[in-house]
Amino acid sequence: MANDLAHLDDLVEGQNCGAECTIVHPVTDEPMPDLVFIVAGPDSDVARRARLKMFDDLGLYEGRPSAEERERLAIEHLARLVVGWRVKRDGKDIDFSFTNVVRELRRHRFIFEQVERFAADRRPYFASTPFGEVE
């Protein structure tokens, strides 16, 4: 049966592989097929390690980090959830790297916001599990 805990183990592994988040234009809502981020899911080991890293980084501050530092930590946390991408600039592929992901998430707030929402949503990850797609 597809509703017992054994199937949730498959969900974690599937979320580690990520799901495709196609960025949409912030005004027209048209998909931008040259901006596809592959994002690990919220239950993945990738997400757990990213959370722990963020908590460790926050623990390095005496008192509260500045707003600028909190924003940097949030961008870096989200960048750790991106496990791949198909992104072009001027028609040429941009190499996938943590540094490049951070740069684009920092440069374009609407991309950050879309990837952040996608990363918190379990629905894209359920389609490939015995639980099936959730509508």
Image (cartoon, helix red, strand yellow):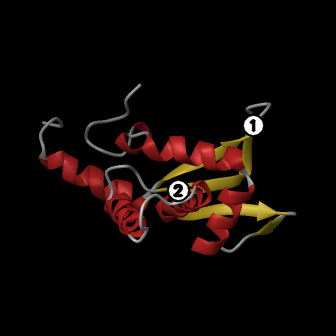
In the image, 101 versus 83, the foreground residue is 101
Please name the residue that numbered disc 1 is placed on: 26
The residue at the point 73 percent across, 70 percent down is 94
Q: Earlier in the sequence, mark 1 or mark 2?
A: 1
For image coordinates 30% across by 44% down, the residue present is: 129
Classify mark 1: helix, strand or loop.
loop
The amino acid on which the numbered mark 2 sits, given as a three-letter code, is Ala
Q: Quadrant of the C terminus?
A: top left
* Residue at the far right in the pictured view: 90
In percent of width and height, residue 23 lies at 67, 45
Mark 1 against mark 2, which lies toward the viewer? 2
Confirm or deny contact between disc 1 and disc 2 (CB under 8 A): no
Taking 57 as reference, is 21 above or below it?
above
Q: What percent of the width, then of the height, locates residue 83? A: 50, 65
Q: Is residue 57 left or right of residue 26?
A: left
Among the 4 quarters of the image, the one containing residue 70: bottom right
25 vs 42: above or below? above
| Tag shown at residue 74 | 2
- Does the rendering let one see residue 97? no
Q: Which mark is residue 61?
A: none
Whether residue 39 is visible: yes
